[in-house]
């Protein structure tokens, strides 16, 4: 069950990811029906609200097409590695193994700083 904090963080995470992506799909130029996808699933608490783990996808590349994050995860992983590179993947893998979890206020502050960075 989502808490009020989860809902707040999800909104901030999505807004920061959208701004960083220029409000378009990471895999095509589509700007309609955009979704925010976790590269590593939400169950990974270390990366759940991490902006580097966010990928903006159109409906087709998220769930609607044969080649989408949910319908062909291997294809999606390969495309994201090609687009973002090994350094990005290595960085989030290291983050996923960190022991210290952030508290709500720390996560909120990081996401708000990301939003402010992309707005300027």
Image: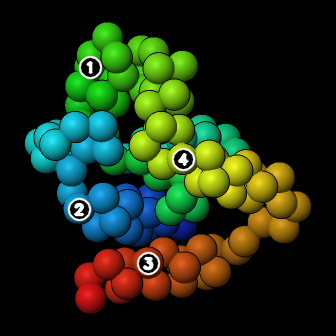
The answer to whether residue 32 shows anywhere in this view is yes
As measured in the structure, the alpha-carbon distance from the residue carrying label 1 to the one carrying label 4 is 25 Å
Comparing 92 with 44, the one in front is 92
Residue 106, how many percent across, how many down? 64, 80
Q: Disc number at residue 85?
A: 4
Determine contact: label 2, label 1, CB under 8 Å: no
As measured in the structure, the alpha-carbon distance from the residue carrying label 4 to the one carrying label 2 is 19 Å
Residue on which the image places disc 3? 114
Residue on which the image places disc 2? 22
Labels 2 and 1: the sequence-earlier one: 2
User: Dot 4: within a 10 Å radius of its alpha carbon, few (fewer than 14), some, or many (20 or more) residues?
Assistant: few
Determine contact: label 1, label 4, CB under 8 Å: no
Viewport quadrant of the N terminus: top right
Determine contact: label 3, label 1, CB under 8 Å: no
Comparing 76 with 4, the one in front is 76
Viewport quadrant of the C terminus: bottom left
As measured in the structure, the alpha-carbon distance from the residue carrying label 4 to the one carrying label 3 is 21 Å
As measured in the structure, the alpha-carbon distance from the residue carrying label 2 to the one carrying label 1 is 21 Å
């Amino acid at each position: 069950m989502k808490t009020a904090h989860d809902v707040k963080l999800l909104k901030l995470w999505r807004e920061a990811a959208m701004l960083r992506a220029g409000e378009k799909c990471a895999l095509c130029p589509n700007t309609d029906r955009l979704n925010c996808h976790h590269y590593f699933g939400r169950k990974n608490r270390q990366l759940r609200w991490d902006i580097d783990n966010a990928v903006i996808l159109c409906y087709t590349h998220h769930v609607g097409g044969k080649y989408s994050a949910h319908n062909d995860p291997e294809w999606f992983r390969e495309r994201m590695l090609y687009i973002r590179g090994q350094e990005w993947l290595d960085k989030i893998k290291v983050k996923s193994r960190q022991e210290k979890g952030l508290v709500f206020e720390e996560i909120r502050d990081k996401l708000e700083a990301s939003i402010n960075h992309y707005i300027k």
